[in-house]
Image (cartoon, helix red, strand yellow):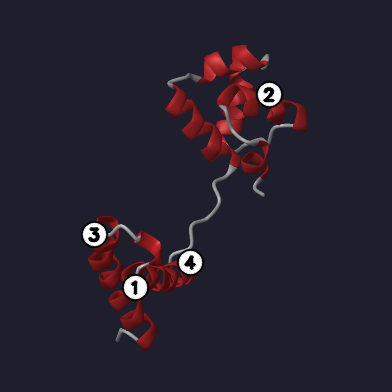
Amino acid sequence: MKPNFEQYKYEFALKRVEALLPLVEDTEKGATSPEGIELMIMSDIVEAYEKEHFPIAKPTVAELIQLSLSEKGMTQKQLAAEIGVSPARINDYVTGRAEPTLRIARLLCTALGITPALLLGV
């Protein structure tokens, strides 16, 4: 498949961002310098292209719980004991077989350090 104009623009902007970053970091004016302004413009082009062509899906409840357990070095059994449910129930949440109730979601947020908005997908 042949690259289109948008892809060329993206690739050019990406290269400019990489070239401008060290210049902006080394200048005293930073974001207000001509290089800083160009960096912001090029970054906007890169961000818009990536949002359209490489969207990042919001994690599922199961993925959030799995990631949080991993980050905390906590087992499903430990989480179950902390929030007062069975380990089998935690496994249901982790595998996506069940969704937690609002009461359990609140306990999960507290135990795992997840913001409610993130868990609710907003």
Left or right of 17 in this view: 90: right
- Local crowd size for mark 1, using a 10 Å CA cut-off: few (<14), some (14–19), many (≥20): few
Labelled pair 2, 1 in contact (Cβ < 8 Å) = no
Report how far apart the C-alphas of labels 3 and 4 lie in the structure. Answer: 25 Å
Residue 100 point in image, percent of width and height: 70, 32
Q: Nearer the viewer, residue 36 or 99?
A: 36
- Local crowd size for mark 2, using a 10 Å CA cut-off: few (<14), some (14–19), many (≥20): some
Amino acid type, label 4: Lys
Mark 1 or mark 3: which comes first in sequence? Answer: 3
Labelled pair 3, 2 in contact (Cβ < 8 Å) = no
| Quadrant position of residue 73 | top left
Q: Which mark is residue 107?
A: 2
Labelled pair 1, 4 in contact (Cβ < 8 Å) = no
Mark 2 or mark 1: which comes first in sequence? Answer: 1
Does residue 120 sit above or below 2 in this rendering? above
Q: Which residue lies at the image location 35% right of the left edge and 87% below the top edge?
A: 4
| Residue tagged 1 | 34
Report how far apart the C-alphas of labels 2 and 1 lie in the structure. Answer: 50 Å
- Local crowd size for mark 4, using a 10 Å CA cut-off: few (<14), some (14–19), many (≥20): few
Q: Which residue lies at the image location 24% right of the left edge and 63% below the top edge?
A: 23
Does residue 59 sit above or below 101 in this rendering? below
| Residue tagged 3 | 22
Amino acid type, label 2: Leu
Mark 1 or mark 4: which comes first in sequence? Answer: 1
Q: Which mark is residue 56?
A: none
Mark 3 or mark 4: which comes first in sequence? Answer: 3
